[in-house]
Image (tube, rainbow, N blue to C red):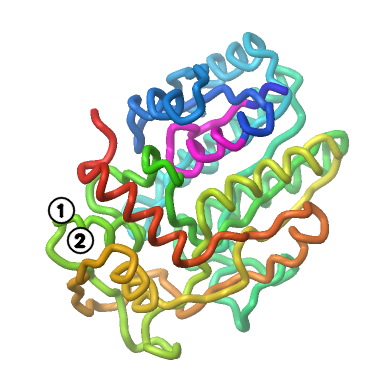
Amino acid sequence: MNVLVTGGMGYIGSHTCIQLLQANITPIIFDNLYNSKASVTSRLHEVTGQELAFVKGDIRDKELLVSTMRQYNIDAVIHFAGLKAVGESVQKPLEYYDNNVNGTLVLVDAMREAGVNSLIFSSSATVYGDPHTVPITEDFPTSATNPYGRSKLMVEECLTDFQKANPDWSITLLRYFNPVGSHQSGRLGEDPQGIPNNLMPFVAQVAVGRREYLSVFGDDYATPDGTGVRDYIHVMDLADGHIAALTKVGDRSGLHTFNLGTGNGSSVLDMVKAFEQASGKSIAYKIAPRRAGDIAECWADPAKAEKELGWKATRSLQQMTQDTWRWQSENPNGYPE
């Protein structure tokens, strides 16, 4: 099976490519390198011992997408490509709608032209907005508190309408909670361009001396220690969730929706303490005002994915922090240019 992986040079995409190869599925990476580096391909080769096909391109380039799908006889698409920072989306909503929503519409149109009708979409728990209760099941009402979340929700709605009109298509919506961790080799990890928007890479960069301190956005939430609570999931568990979705429902027509999370919530300060234990470093932090669009707590009920996909997150918080520290300490400046 040949799978086009949009955004395959990015954090989650690159780790998923490793697991695809493990499952004897051939990934073809399609990425514009906006928030990733070309050197990821050499690391993937190093870890897997295999050369991966890479096409540099933007998902809004329909002609290139169609020709790539035809050239590599693509059977299915896993769609990671998109802008992903909540704070930035508040500042640049138009860019987020263009890249995430318009980009996906162009991609689906290209798939239709190339005769590919199996899509796995990288969605997000942000589509649940500010949930009234936790844990969150897939039938919770959806809403959004920021343009990033709204772009994911818009794409879900577009794909839902499209699948209804094209019932032979298989479309899977995977709603991620908070991916952290790195490949156990220490050769692949999260390497955001500029200032990290997510907690773990920021904590790791403080530990390795790249940043002076962590800003903790809000300590007055209605949570045990006042800081935001999230469901942190190891990126390799998340990658395994894509393989399960591809092999279990990728060839089954219909709309399939799954939460990918652990079912456990950890606060920002819980994560800081866990990282201090894993790294042996003290993490300096300062309390800052809440960020626009952030919510108090959010964690998954992942029972549906376990029942229907046979998938369950197995890696512990200790593994997540140890693997993150291995990556960051061995690659203090991230991937080479």
Q: Residue at x 42, y 41 (%)?
A: 185
At 65% across and 51% down in the image, what residue appears? 174
Q: Which residues are magenta?
A: 4-19
Contact check, label 1 and label 2, Cβ < 8 Å: yes
Pointer 1 residue:
210
Q: Quadrant of residue 310?
A: bottom right
Quarter-wise, where is residue 304 in the image? bottom right
Q: Position of residue 279 (x, y in %)?
A: 28, 63
Q: Name the residue located 66 percent from the left edge and 49 percent from the top edge.
A: 241
Amino acid beneath label 1: Arg
User: Residue 206, labelled with which disc?
Assistant: 2
Q: Is disc 2 placed on a helix, strand or loop?
A: helix
Element marked by disc 1: loop
**Dot 2 alpha-carbon crowd within 10 angstroms: few under 14, some 14 to 19, many 20 or more:** some
Image coords of residue 313 (percent x, y): 63, 60
Query: From this viewpoint, which residue is outermost toward the top?
Result: 71
Given residues 300 and 269, the one toward you in this image is 269
* Quadrant where the image shows the N terminus: top right
Q: Disc 1 and disc 2: Cα gap in Å?
A: 6 Å
Quadrant that contains the C terminus: top left
* Magenta-span inclusion, residue 86: no
Does the magenta run of residues contain 9? yes
